[in-house]
Image (cartoon, helix red, strand yellow):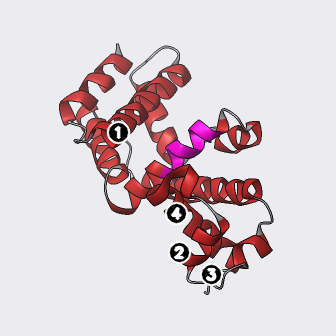
Amino acid sequence: MPIDRRTLLADAAIGVLADAGMRGLTHRAVDRAAGLPSGTTSAYYRTRQALLIALVRRLVALDQAELEEIGGRTPPLRNASELTAGLVAFTEHRLAGEGRRRSLARYACAIESVHHPELCEILVPRENLARQAVRDFLAARGVADVEERTVTLLTCVDGLVFDRLVNGGSVSGQEIHGLVAAALR
């Protein structure tokens, strides 16, 4: 099925943002990245803010689809080692290839959302099967405040990804194991 033009432009905008940063996100840069004639992006998204909103919506849709797929193929987690391994694999994906590019774009959008509440509303974490798998694991172990612990654990993992994007390196199994152990306490 061919991709529609708005989606193509939003995908190109994610790439431009990842590669050139917020200042490099222009209508012309998106036109070039999409391989379309000059003026195409501005015909679909008149303002930079409209382009940014489309980019954030597409980014969230891609992330949600990915998290649903991960959660859908993850059998019930039997122990902390399985949860740790799953989270390590997730961080590795977020730090390499296309996952890295989307992570860079996501964090740039998160910073931008401080000044644009309409972006913040789009970026609010959503329920998905991967989050549910973590929640179910913690609940099965009798963790009090399971929702709060789930959010804290996943936020800490997200913080490690952010740190490694900025400072380089990878997330170790030992770091994730420590976070999982803390969530289980």
Q: Name the residue carrying label 4.
A: 16
Image vertical order of residue 52 relative to residue 123, above or below? below
Task: Identify the magenta region.
Answer: 105-112
- Label 3: how many Cα within 10 Å (few below 14, some 14–19, many 20+): few
**Image-based side of 106 in relation to 70, left or right:** right
Picture disc at residue 166: 1
Which residue position is annotated with label 2?
A: 33
Position of 137 relative to 64 (above/below): above
Give amino acid for label 1. Val
Element at label 1: helix
Point out residue 22 in the picture as x, y percentages from the top left corner.
56, 50
Q: CA distance from mark 1 to mark 4?
A: 18 Å
Q: Nearer the viewer, mark 1 or mark 3?
A: 1
**157 with respect to 146 (left or right):** left
Q: Which residue is mark 3?
A: 3
How far is the residue under mark 2 from the one under mark 4? 7 Å
Q: CA distance from mark 2 to mark 3?
A: 15 Å
**Contact, mark 2 vs mark 4 (Cβ under 8 Å):** yes
In the structure shown, which secondary structural element does the residue marked by tag 2 occupy?
A: helix
Residue 183 spot, x, y in % from top left: 38, 20
**Amino acid type of the residue that numbered disc 2 sits on in the rendered structure:** Ala
What residue do we see at 25% from left, 38% from top? 171
The kind of secondary structure element at disc 3 is: loop
Task: Tell me if residue 143 comes above or below residue 95 in the rendering.
Answer: above
118 part of magenta stretch: no
Q: How many marks?
A: 4
Closer to the camera in the image, 99 or 128: 99
Query: Mark 1 vs mark 4: which is more N-terminal?
Result: 4
**From mark 1 to mark 3, how far is it between C-alphas?**
32 Å
